[in-house]
Image (cartoon, rainbow, N blue to C red):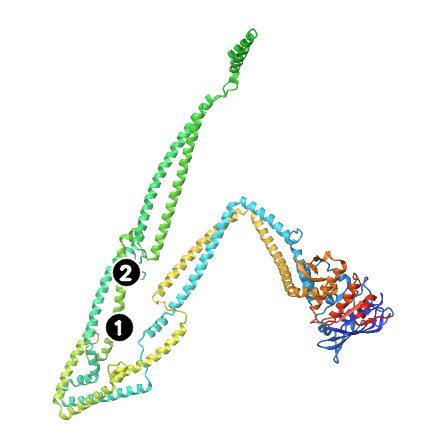
Amino acid sequence: MKLIAIELVGFGKWQQHKIEFLPKNQLLFGANEAGKSTIYQFIQAMLFGFPAKGKRKKDYQPKNGAAYGGRLWFAHPVYGEVQVERFKGQNKGQAKVYFDDQIGDEALLEKMIHPLTKELFQSVFTFQQEQLSQLEKLNEEELQTSLLSLGLSGSQQLLLSREDYFKSAQTIYKGKGSQPPLNQKLHAYQKLQQRINDKEQQERPFQQLDVELSDTEHQIATQRQAAQEIKNQLALVEKQVMNLPLYEELQSIEQAKTTALLKPEEQEELLAIYQQHRFLSEELTRLNQEIAAQSETEDHNEDYQFYLKEEEQIQQLLNQRYDIDKLLSEISWMTQSLQQNQQEMCPLERQWGWNSETPPQLSFEEQVVKEMREEIVARAVKLQTTQTDLQLLEEEITTREDNLSTFETINKEMFRKNHRQPKKAVNFVFCGFAGIIVLLSFFLPVPIRYGAFFLSAGLLIAGVLPLFHQPKDNYENEKRQWQEKLSQLDYLNDQLVKIKSEIKKIREEETEMARFIAQKVKENNLGRMDQVEFWVTHRTDITRYLILRNTNQELEHQLKEDQKRVTVLAEQTERYTARLPIAGTSLAERIRVISNFADKMEKVRFAQEYQADAYSRQTIREVKEKQQQVIDQARPLLQRFQLGSINEIPDMVQSYQKATANHKRKQELQTMLVGLYPDSSEPKQFPSSQRELAQSLDEIEACIQQLQEKEQKILYQRQQMLSDGTLDELYQEQTELKTEIEELALDWSAYQLSGQLLMDLLNELSEKQLPNLLKKATDYFKLLTRNAYRGIQLHEEQLIVIREDQQRFMLHELSTGTRDQVIMAVRFAFLSLQEQRNLCPIIIDDGWLHYDSQRKEQLAQLFAVFSEHQQVICFSSDQEMVSYYKELKQPIIELEGA
């Protein structure tokens, strides 16, 4: 945006005055009180609204009652030339916007100049001396913050928001504060925790109950989780059991022999061969019947007619006589073996409580079982030995305690009688002799006198020595004996504790071993074989029982298959029960009767053919030859589809149709049972798995019930200990205080995190532009100082300048004018980062208070250079600056009095 012109209809001292601006650099010159600041306020009011009235604020409303407001024109890169009109008495002071034959309102003006705001206009695009002085001491953090507030549009609001977040956080908590509510709550929590600790020390059993209660609750939760898992497994198994018939049907279809697929033409060819063969067979039967009618064997005519009709099937059945006899022999042998094995298994089942559904298993190797037995025996021997040692040690301790009591009684009596303080007395004999010798020494010569003195001194010392002599304690030996007896008794008591601890450990090991054995008995279905000794001596019983059970299972399976074959063969003979006496008989008897019947009918055939004429015999031979030709013609197809005779063709076609139906049924079952049965599933194990899971669930629920009863007992004991309510009230108070602290901490962390996020965002934005800022600032600073300084850098987070002679200076080490030049260079560097956006003209109001003539000239050059990219409007009453503008051939607008 670039200002084109302003028209002050009525604003302060200005009335009906219009000023036109140039697109680059210009100087508005006027004496003091000429209205330069009023023009600046007018531009601001046209763009952002009239200033609010205040006691200490200047009122720009005309005194003569003229219209308060005016017009402003600016060039916009999108909307072109725009006119803004604003009067206080019209449209409630709202702006009217005219552009491209259109009229807009205040909202449209805000949209046009966005993101330019009043705060951004004042802090970024206007230069005043007081603003420059605020940046005298810049470190890296402050420089980045200033870069954000001055060089990035809209970031001032982010800075304000960040400060609001940090202030809000500090109202809740300060690191070294005491008044914020979170500090007070934390302090109160520490005091309360100390009270709780003191109270818990007094109620240490209560803490033990808490630990036990927590452990019990954890066990209950674990058991419940296990129960839920078993319930899920049980639900799946129940569903599997419920759908087991469908699964078995699917298995039977999958295991059924796959029938070869028939093409329509092949099916028609097979059926044609079957019809031709059937026709010839019927023709042959008719001829035989005619011969039979002419023969003399009328008594057997009906039987013979039946034989002729069923001849082929009867012969096929009789051809299997060898296989049938072998099959019946195998069934007899397997039935007998099964009975013998069952008779051998019954005593073992009665003795050990086994059953074939859950057979016993012994997962241990024989060597491991022997080692377990040796360990049990060694533990029993050790327990017996330790109990014997315990008994002897208790007797020894009792005896020593009695002796010690007697010894103590005797010594106390002797001590009262004999251990009295002896009376100390002076030996008057030695003292008397000493006195006599001293008296006599005065009458002796000098050398002898000194000897007498020494002798009297010795006698005197001997006389008073009993006063200083302490007699030896006569009962010292008895005290030593007393201490030795006590030490021995203490040692024996220590040994007693160790032996008891060892016995307790052995019994715990026995209990653990018994639990382990019981668990293995249950897991392996061992029944009454619940001792390790049995596992060693009767191991062969388990092996034999398992062999017999597996053998019986194989025999039962094979017997079942053979019985199915017998049933199929017997069903094939059912068609003859109306003619032959085989109803209710065994398969062997039926085969014998049918064989005799066939032999008898063959004799009848021979007799009839013998009596027949030559023509009939020739016709029969021709029919048989044609029948043989049909068989020869059909043989490749029969071999291809593995058929034994032409009569099997209808069954084969029927099996094909059945296979098609089975395939359709298989797809239906697979859809119904999808995901229900894994590949490794065994249907026979589903019922047993269901029972095991149900049993496990009952056990876990019983365990949960026991744990819940234990929990109730602990809770009751805990409630009894909390009957005074003190510790309970402290816990309640702690919980409430902790809740309040968590809420405050949550609020504090939210404010702190929000502020930090904004700070990180602002730092990221500023760090990206900071190098460019320093480069631009260096260029402008060189221009302002005529290359007296070579650069502006950051060192240890502080702004420094480098002179041409490589000397470095901090800002506070510079003169006021040079420091202002540094700040001016940094400010213009900020603005250069925004030159592409061109949000607003640069407005400068006498920003060179501390500049001398040379610095003013360089500043004018900076304005001229900078205005190549952005519009610069400079207000000044400095005549010297006017001369520099003239030298640089920059435009000057003189302000006349209003």
Spatial CA span between label 2 and label 1: 27 Å
Q: Residue furthest right?
A: 64
Circle count: 2
Can I make out residue 771 in this image? yes
Examine the rendered structure and indicate whether residue 418 appears above or below residue 609. above
Residue mark closest to the camera, 2 vs 1: 2
Horizontal placement of 56 versus 254: left or right? right
Q: Residue furthest bottom?
A: 615
Rendered location of residue 416, percent (x, y):
47, 23
Q: Which residue is mark 1?
A: 564
Which residue occupies 39% across, 61% down? Answer: 694
State which quadrant residue 174 falls in: bottom right
Quadrant the C terminus occupies: bottom right
**Local SS, label 2:** helix
Q: Which residue is mark 2?
A: 546
Quadrant the N terminus occupies: bottom right
